[in-house]
Image (tube, grey):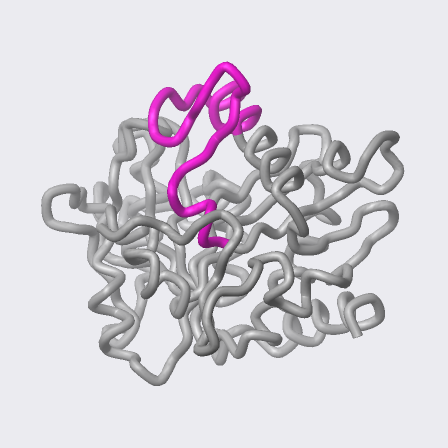
């Protein structure tokens, strides 16, 4: 693949400009609930702090051992960080400089940027390029590296993150959100009921379907349909996956074992046009008063 964009530059028709001056969204909060505020990273120090939060969660808590982890400064970093926008949740009630108040993060990679930096992160696991080629009229956004510090894993943190995502989606005219979502561990059989439920009840329609790359494909229908307890299966799913499903997301064909992160990954497809109107109204109302 091509090298990623430099950490300071994005490219427009007029040449290179500073990535932190390229988007009007950088200057404003995109949402707020109580002391929690969400906005895009404004400088390298904030990105580095977000990478440390990711390290604490993925490496320190969940036991990931490979991929983009770097020491001794303990950052989770890879080549995509330079090209992505970084959505950050701050607890404004915490003391110290702003970049020490980051309690959650999401990584956002738009299709136009991915096209210039060698593709999407998910391309290594799923046939995302085939999907984008089928929908040349849509602008895709990849969501990834989602994490929140343990003491902030609450409904309001998720809601403020989605206020920020929705403001970003609206600003950039995003038509489809995609990305990998994970089950813990590297044994799909441990999640047989939940994976089978996704395979039977939440699969993407043919127009939006994405298959795991052949060399990494693992079937998700590990149990016969009649043996799946849908209520128990959904209850056993990670909160992030349940949240995507509530919004109207669907799941691609097959799961992938990621040994570096110690996860079983499924692919999320969420066309913006299929998001339930009540969620659009809710997240728009939550962000408009601070982002307008």
Q: Nearer the viewer, residue 158 or 74?
A: 74
**Residue lying at 44% horizontally and 23% vertically, measured from the top left:** 70
- Does the rendering let one see residue 197? no
**Residue lying at 49% horizontally and 80% vertically, measured from the top left:** 273
Is 251 displayed left or right of 89 in the figure? left
Number of on-image labels: 0
**Residue lying at 78% horizontally and 51% vertically, measured from the top left:** 37
Q: Tell me the quadrant of the picture where the C terminus can be found.
A: bottom right
Note whether 169 is above or below 240 in the view shown. Answer: below
Note whether 215 is above or below 168 in the view shown. Answer: above
Name, please, the residue furthest toward the left: 215
Name, please, the residue furthest toward the front: 15
Is residue 47 a member of the stretch shown in magenta? Answer: no
Note whether 275 is above or below 74 in the view shown. Answer: below
Note whether 264 is above or below 121 in the view shown. Answer: above
Is residue 77 a member of the stretch shown in magenta? Answer: yes
Name, please, the residue furthest toward the top: 72
Q: Nearer the viewer, residue 34 or 2?
A: 2
Is 216 displayed left or right of 74 in the figure? left
Expressed as whole percent of the image width and height from the top left, the position of residue 228 reads 33, 46
Quarter assignment of residue 96:
top right
Q: Magenta stretch: give its range.
A: 55-84
**Residue lying at 28% horizontally and 44% vertically, measured from the top left:** 227
Q: Nearer the viewer, residue 176 or 47?
A: 47
Is 254 displayed left or right of 145 in the figure? left
Expressed as whole percent of the image width and height from the top left, the position of residue 249 reads 44, 64
Expressed as whole percent of the image width and height from the top left, the position of residue 233 reads 42, 44
Quarter assignment of residue 260:
top left
- Does the rendering let one see residue 27? yes
């Amino acid at each position: 693949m091509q090298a990623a964009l430099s950490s300071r530059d994005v490219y427009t028709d007029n040449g290179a400009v500073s990535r932190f001056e390229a988007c009007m969204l950088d200057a404003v909060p995109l949402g707020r609930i109580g002391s929690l505020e969400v906005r895009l990273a404004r400088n390298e120090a904030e990105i580095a702090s977000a990478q440390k939060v990711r390290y604490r969660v993925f490496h320190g808590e969940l036991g990931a051992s490979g991929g983009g982890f770097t020491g001794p400064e303990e950052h989770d970093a890879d080549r995509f960080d330079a090209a992505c926008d970084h959505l950050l949740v701050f607890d404004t009630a915490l003391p110290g400089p702003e970049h020490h108040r980051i309690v959650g993060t999401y990584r956002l990679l738009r299709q136009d940027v991915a096209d210039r930096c060698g593709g999407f992160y998910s391309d290594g696991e799923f046939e995302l390029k085939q999907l984008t080629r089928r929908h040349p009229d849509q602008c895709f956004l990849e969501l990834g590296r989602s994490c929140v510090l343990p003491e902030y894993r609450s409904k309001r943190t998720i809601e403020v993150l989605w206020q920020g995502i929705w403001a970003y989606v609206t600003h950039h005219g995003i038509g489809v959100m995609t990305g990998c979502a994970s089950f813990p561990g590297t044994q799909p059989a441990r999640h047989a009921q939940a994976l089978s439920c996704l395979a039977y009840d939440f699969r993407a329609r043919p127009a939006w379907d994405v298959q795991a790359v052949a060399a990494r494909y693992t079937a998700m229908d590990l149990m016969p349909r009649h043996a799946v307890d849908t209520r128990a299966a959904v209850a056993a799913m990670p909160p992030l996956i349940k949240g995507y499903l509530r919004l109207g997301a669907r799941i691609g064909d097959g799961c992938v074992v990621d040994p570096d992160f110690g996860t079983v990954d499924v692919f999320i497809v969420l066309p913006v046009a299929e998001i339930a109107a009540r969620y659009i109204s809710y997240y728009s109302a939550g962000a408009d008063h601070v982002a307008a």
